[in-house]
């Protein structure tokens, strides 16, 4: 049985967390004059671009943003991301991620999908800037649902349609505590990409394997196999 490997984007495949956070907060200020916005993303109901924007907007103006207001924000946010990336020589890929994705795609055993909390336009820009594969990879982003679990479920469904098979075993790869929490709620296995305090936070949430990057592909592959075996055993027990 094939195992679906589903990836977050920021901090997981691309070194873009800092650029993303700065551009997001700057766009809120430039487009709407919103300042003193909490960048503690765990304080929002869902850690996704759509949910954070809606909740900030509601807290500041007491109403939900219109489609045009969302569009205006997305446009400026993307412009700031592009400008910031150009100023720093482009978005960098997490070390080893390009080779790892190529090997998984060539393996025939591990179909992949992208499921990130950002909007599609910004996620695709970052992947392209980091020279990571985009074509023929099923994906879902914050345009599709405002919850991470919803985004994961849509990416899962699109992957099953694209690969034309049931993919009951899923491993989610992420860097934030919200990633592992959403994976657990979705019944997926999890592998972390983080170091130092961020890695500790993932271990505290129950992660069994956390890597700083993908340079050690063999260890990552072993963790994938272990994660899917654990998931299979859990499914059998339930």
Image (cartoon, grey):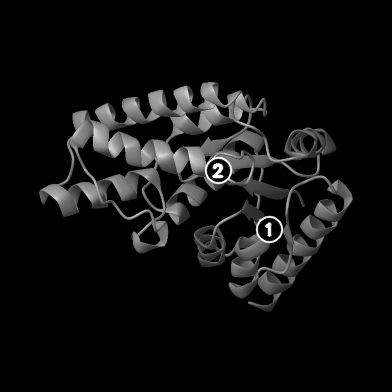
- In the rendered view, tell whether residue 42 sits above or below residue 18: below
Task: Depth check: give the residue in front, 102 or 152.
Answer: 102
Expressed as whole percent of the image width and height from the top left, the position of residue 60 reads 16, 50
Q: Residues within 10 Å of mark 2 (few under 14, many from 20)?
A: many
Expressed as whole percent of the image width and height from the top left, the position of residue 180 reads 57, 62
SS of the residue at dot 1? Answer: loop
On the image, numbered disc 2 is attached to which residue?
Answer: 10
SS of the residue at dot 2? Answer: loop
Can you say which quadrant of the picture contains the C terminus?
Answer: bottom right
Q: Is residue 205 left or right of residue 106?
A: left
Please tell me which residue is depicted at 85% across the width and 49% down the height of the picture: 216
Expressed as whole percent of the image width and height from the top left, the position of residue 13 reads 64, 41
Q: Is residue 163 left or right of residue 158?
A: right
Task: Depth check: give the residue in front, 189 or 201.
Answer: 201
- In the rendered view, tell whether residue 47 sits above or below residue 202: above
- In the rendered view, tell whether residue 114 sits above or below residue 168: above
Q: Which mark is residue 113?
A: none
On the image, numbered disc 1 is attached to which residue?
Answer: 195
Expressed as whole percent of the image width and height from the top left, the position of residue 212 reads 73, 53
Please tell me which residue is depicted at 67% across the width and 35% down the height of the picture: 93
Task: Depth check: give the residue in front, 178 or 129.
Answer: 129
């Amino acid at each position: 049985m094939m195992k679906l490997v589903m990836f977050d984007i920021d901090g997981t495949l691309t070194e873009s967390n800092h650029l993303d956070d700065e551009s997001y907060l700057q766009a809120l200020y430039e487009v709407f004059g919103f300042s003193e916005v909490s960048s503690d993303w765990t304080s929002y109901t869902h850690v996704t671009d759509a949910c954070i924007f809606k909740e900030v907007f509601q807290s500041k103006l007491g109403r939900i943003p219109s489609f045009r207001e969302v569009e205006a924000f997305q446009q400026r946010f993307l412009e700031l991301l592009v400008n910031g990336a150009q100023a720093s020589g482009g978005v960098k890929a997490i070390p080893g991620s390009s080779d790892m994705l190529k090997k998984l795609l060539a393996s025939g055993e591990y179909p992949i999908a992208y499921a990130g909390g950002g909007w599609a336009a910004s996620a695709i820009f970052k992947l392209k800037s980091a020279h990571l594969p985009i074509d023929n990879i099923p994906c879902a982003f914050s345009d599709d649902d405002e919850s991470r679990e919803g985004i994961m479920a849509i990416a899962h469904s699109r992957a099953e349609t694209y690969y034309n098979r049931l993919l009951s075993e899923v491993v989610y790869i992420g860097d934030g505590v919200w990633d592992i929490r959403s994976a657990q709620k979705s019944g997926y296995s999890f592998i972390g990409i983080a170091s130092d305090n961020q890695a500790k936070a993932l271990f505290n949430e129950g992660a069994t394997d956390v890597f700083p990057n993908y340079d050690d592909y063999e260890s990552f592959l072993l963790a994938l196999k272990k994660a899917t075996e654990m998931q299979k055993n859990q499914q059998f027990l339930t």
